[in-house]
Image (cartoon, rainbow, N blue to C red):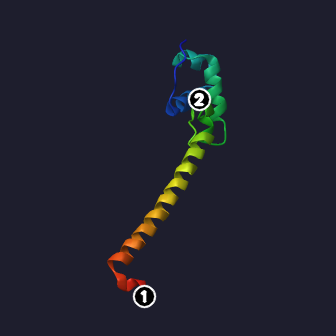
Amino acid sequence: MEGRKFTLEEGLAIASYCLKNNCDYKATAQLFQISEQKVQRWVHRFRGDDSDSLIDPRETSSDQPSKVEKDQLLNDIRHLKQANRRLRVENALLQLLQNPSLSS
């Protein structure tokens, strides 16, 4: 049996079918042409408290940046803040030069 990826819906269907058929892992595995171990894994996850337990944690990607990415982002923010301050000063100076009455 070839190992293939299953969608969450397929896993739910497999686990649900198995549970409705007295947890007959072997018959479920033969019907869906997968290993008994995979059926057992899905049923075990299905019996969890929430549907998130059906998602394999190895297949989820982390939304958190790595330490290197985080350091680079913080460095970029620091440079942008410095550039922003410099542009504000330049803008204020230009306004003063264009409208001398504001300096009083």
| Identity of the residue drawn at 63% across and 29% down | 43
Q: Is residue 66 left or right of residue 83?
A: right
**Label 2: few (<14), some or many (≥20) within 10 Å?**
many
Q: Position of residue 9 (x, y in %)?
A: 50, 33
Q: Which residue is mark 1?
A: 104
Q: Position of residue 58 (x, y in %)?
A: 61, 30
Q: Position of residue 47 (x, y in %)?
A: 66, 35
| Identity of the residue drawn at 47% across and 63% down | 86
Q: Pick whichever, 83 or 49, lies toward us.
A: 83
User: Helix, strand, or loop for circle 2?
Assistant: helix
Say which amino acid is labelled 2: Ala
Instruction: Looking at the image, tell me whether mark 1 or mark 2 is earlier in sequence order.
Output: 2
Q: Position of residue 22 (x, y in %)?
A: 64, 26
Q: Which residue is mark 2?
A: 15
Q: Is residue 86 left or right of residue 55?
A: left
Inspect this view and state whether residue 66 appears: no
